[in-house]
Image (cartoon, rainbow, N blue to C red):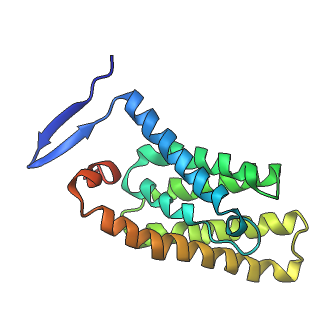
Amino acid sequence: MTIIAILYFYGEVVIIMSQTRLLMLNAAVAALYAALTIGLAPVSYGPVQVRLSECMTLLAFGSRRYVPGLISGCFIANFGSPLGVADIFVGTAATALSVYIMSRCRNLCLASLVPVVVNGAVIGLELFGLDIIPAEALVPTALYIGAGELLSVTVLGVILYSVLRRNDVIRQYIEPRK
């Protein structure tokens, strides 16, 4: 039997989730991340990429409980990568590092810049290590990847997150910490 407690705490409704509900939410986050990435595959992979699904990483800023879903979604999405096994592990590790750091940030704008730096550097190095880009293209490629992250997370993600947090019901899911 699944029990969900709803508490009234300092004038706000606080939802305490059961493990089953938390697992379902993470599965939904993972599925949405993977579907967005794979569905927009022409722009989701490679030296110049804009992963629109990356705007979802801001969920980790609001609540650490979404970190497993975001990492799982990236892992699944990277099965569609033309880089193969390397991207499954290296790309997922980059996202894992990003969401871990983001989950500890206290400023939304600062949190949104974490994947810009981490993914730009890690994915740039991955492409160089796989001999997809030459050494002289490493910095420009890292900047292109960082620019895609900036567009997806810092611009689109922050706007979307700010709009969603205005809704009292949604805010309980994306920003449960005080």
Q: Position of residue 161 (x, y in %)?
A: 37, 65
Tell me if residue 109 can be seen.
yes
Tell me if residue 96 can be seen.
no
**Where 71 sits versus 129, above or below?**
above
Q: Quadrant of residue 130?
A: bottom right
**Residue at the (59%, 48%) spot, across then down:** 73
Q: Number of labelled discs?
A: 0
Q: Position of residue 26 (x, y in %)?
A: 48, 41
Quadrant, the N terminus: top left
Q: Is 137 placed left or right of 1 in the picture? A: right
**Where 26 sits versus 162, above or below?**
above
Which residue occupies the extreme left position in the image?
11
Which residue occupies the extreme front position in the image?
39
Q: Position of residue 19 (x, y in %)?
A: 39, 28
Q: Quadrant of residue 129?
A: bottom right
**Residue at the (88%, 69%) spot, across then down:** 132
Q: Is 86 placed left or right of 131 in the picture? A: left
**Residue at the (84%, 69%) spot, across then down:** 128
Q: Is 32 placed left or right of 137 in the picture? A: left
Q: Position of residue 63 (x, y in %)?
A: 38, 50
